[in-house]
Image (tube, rainbow, N blue to C red):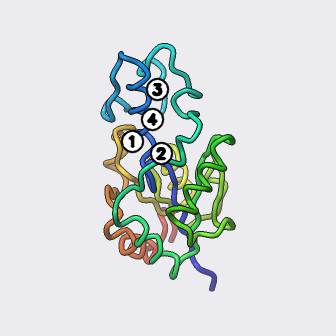
Amino acid sequence: MSKKIVAIDMDDTICHLIPKAISYHNAQYDQPQLAMEHITSFNLHGIWHPQCTEDVFFGRPGLYEELDIFDEHTVEEIRKMMTDYDVIVITAARPSSVPEKWKWMQQHLPFIPYDNFFVAKRKYLVDFDLLIDDGPHNVIAAREAGKQTILIPRPWNAHIQKDYVLKDSWDGMYELVGELLSEKPDGRE
Ligand SMILES: [Mg+2]
């Protein structure tokens, strides 16, 4: 039997994108000074400075190479998962950021081969068994497709947190994945 596929998002799941993007925004513009709790959706228009754009906020050259790893457990928990599961990293990357993201992966998770590095915005088209992600649209679509999910709780997914399995640290993530994958997927007999 082939291994089950565990799909792991990158930004704000394996590494911290929004805090770094906020810090650059706040250095560039005096007002408003953004904080994590202000980011209650992925639509940042009206929240960031009037001159800020998607390209300014998310497209800064080099941004994706300098992101911090999520926490001190991330690497080891993913490494453990690699022995039992087919682990893929799946990111809705801006095309210009893909080389930066791959460099980051090689630096922090060099044991993940590029066969397992998926760039996809419509993640629900990929046939994984379980998704670890902070994006509400991604976990909702995954559940609708009958997959297991783990939601990384963040201000922008507060509205769905009560309905999902949450994990705010990578400590114990391998064990939680094992528990969920030993259950039957949502909605299936
Ligand atoms: Mg994400």
Circle 3 SS class: loop
Circle 4 SS class: helix
The residue carrying mark 2 is: 135
Badge 1 vs badge 4, beta-carbon distance below 8 Å: no
Query: Which sits earlier in the primary sequence, circle 2 or circle 1?
Result: 2
Q: Nearer the viewer, residue 114 or 142?
A: 114
The residue carrying mark 4 is: 21
User: Within 10 angstroms of label 4, few (less than 14), some, or many (20 or more) residues?
Assistant: many
User: Within 10 angstroms of label 1, few (less than 14), some, or many (20 or more) residues?
Assistant: some
Amino acid, disc 1: Asn
Distance from disc 3 to disc 1, alpha carbons, whole Å, reads: 14 Å
Residue 4 in picture, x, y percent from top left: 56, 75
Q: Nearer the viewer, mark 2 or mark 3?
A: 3
Picture residue at 63% right of the left edge, 82% below the top: 2
Q: Nearer the viewer, residue 56 or 39?
A: 56
Distance from disc 2 to disc 3, alpha carbons, whole Å, reads: 14 Å
Badge 2 vs badge 1, beta-carbon distance below 8 Å: yes
Label 2 CB sits under 8 Å from any ligand 1 atom: yes
The residue carrying mark 1 is: 157
Label number found at residue 23? none
